[in-house]
């Protein structure tokens, strides 16, 4: 167990000290409900089959702004394993990219109240760019025709949790892949480097019907400023959740989630931009639906806190 603890702390240290990265993956204000995408160790941790559908429209009012649609699925298998699947379609201007990944996790009880999940993910992304419709770099011969390519990738993650606390560390794309990035209508060749994520959160009961749920997500990728989300949620009567989010030097957000039944939740968030895009963007909308299909009666691992 000491070796496991040392490994977890070493991975956490590397994640915080690694130089921060350029080409960045889609960002979610509702990151707590999209953990499959960034951490394969999350698969099966909820103890039931969970399906999430997320629609993300960024920089509203800006033609060609990012649009992201996400579908995730995960479930426990037996007493220690979990499996998952994620599909993300991301479009900006004339660039479209579809990510498809399968996840596998294995759970190890640390104490009677704590579990450590190890996870791996494998898959890749399909990139499509219609370069003939945009202004391109004259120095690069790659930009004389459309781009269609597949980039395979793998990822790893750790997820430690009790019934009141969780901490995750992950790198969902270990392989650097060739990419393209835009500045206005100009596209240039780029490289997508390793992304590191650290997430955490706690549940703090404030009474019989109110629970305070602070959480955070930090991510680093070489060549770009570190992205840090700080979120404060309040869960009321185990039905309604209301909160705010601050993304460092980027946006302020309001978010809410409502449980319609034992098996269905819906959520919404709105990001107000507080950087140079303020004058051309009316913010970002995110709508999501979560389906908790069934529970695994044979799974005796410690489950994640409710609503994580």
Image: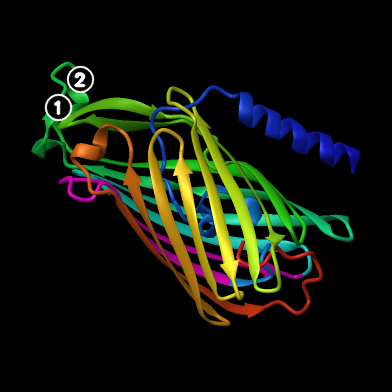
- Coloring scheme of the render? rainbow
Horizontal and vertical percent for residue 104? Answer: 64, 56
Helix, strand or loop status at disc 2? loop
Q: Which residue is mark 2?
A: 140
Badge 2, how many Cα within 10 Å: few under 14, some, many 20+?
few
Region of the chain picked out in magenta, as a range: 50-78
Q: Is residue 262 left or right of residue 276?
A: right
Q: Is residue 95 magenta?
A: no
- Classify residue 139 by image quadrant: top left
> Mark 1 and mark 2 in contact (Cβ < 8 Å)?
yes
Instruction: Give me the C-alpha separation between circle 2 and circle 1.
Output: 8 Å
Main secondary structure along the magenta-highlighted residues: strand
Residue at 25% over, 39% down: 278
Instruction: Give the residue at the far front of this rendering.
Output: 207
Picture layout, residue 99 above or below residue 198: below
**Nearest-to-viewer mark from 2 and 1:** 1
Residue at 18% over, 45% down: 62
* Residue 221 in sight from this viewpoint: yes
Picture layout, residue 156 above or below residue 46: above
- Classify residue 233 by image quadrant: bottom right
Q: Is residue 18 left or right of residue 258?
A: right
Task: Locate the N terminus by quadrant.
Answer: top right
Horizontal and vertical percent for residue 291? Answer: 51, 75
Horizontal and vertical percent for residue 120? Answer: 63, 48
Residue at 40% over, 28% down: 22
Q: Which residue is mark 1?
A: 136
Q: Is residue 55 magenta?
A: yes
């Amino acid at each position: 167990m000491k070796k496991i603890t040392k490994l977890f702390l070493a991975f956490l240290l590397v994640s915080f000290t690694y130089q921060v990265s350029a080409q960045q993956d889609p960002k979610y204000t509702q990151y707590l409900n999209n953990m499959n995408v960034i951490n394969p160790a999350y698969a099966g941790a909820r103890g039931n089959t969970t399906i999430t559908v997320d629609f993300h429209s960024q920089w509203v009012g800006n033609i060609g702004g990012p649009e992201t649609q996400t579908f995730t699925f995960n479930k426990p298998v037996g007493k220690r394993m979990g499996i998952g699947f994620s599909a993300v379609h991301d479009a900006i201007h004339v660039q479209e990219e579809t990510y498809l990944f399968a996840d596998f996790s294995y759970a190890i009880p640390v104490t009677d109240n704590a579990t450590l999940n190890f996870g791996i993910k494998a898959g890749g992304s399909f990139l499509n760019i219609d370069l003939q419709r945009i202004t391109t770099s004259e120095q690069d011969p790659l930009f004389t025709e459309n781009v269609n390519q597949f980039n395979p990738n793998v990822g790893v993650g750790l997820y430690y949790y009790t019934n009141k606390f969780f901490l995750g560390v992950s790198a969902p794309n270990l392989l650097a892949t060739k990419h393209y990035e835009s500045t206005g209508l100009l596209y240039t060749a780029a490289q997508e480097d390793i992304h590191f994520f650290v997430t955490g959160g706690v549940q703090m009961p404030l009474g019989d019907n109110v629970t305070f749920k602070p959480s955070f997500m930090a991510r680093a990728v070489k060549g770009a400023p570190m992205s840090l989300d700080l979120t404060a949620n309040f869960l009321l009567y185990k039905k309604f959740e209301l909160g705010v989010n601050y993304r460092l030097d980027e946006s302020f957000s309001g978010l809410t989630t409502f449980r319609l039944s034992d098996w269905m939740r819906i959520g919404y968030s709105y990001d107000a931009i507080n950087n140079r895009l303020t004058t051309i963007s009316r913010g970002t909308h995110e709508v999501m639906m979560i389906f908790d299909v069934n529970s695994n009666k044979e799974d005796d691992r410690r489950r994640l806190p409710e609503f994580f």
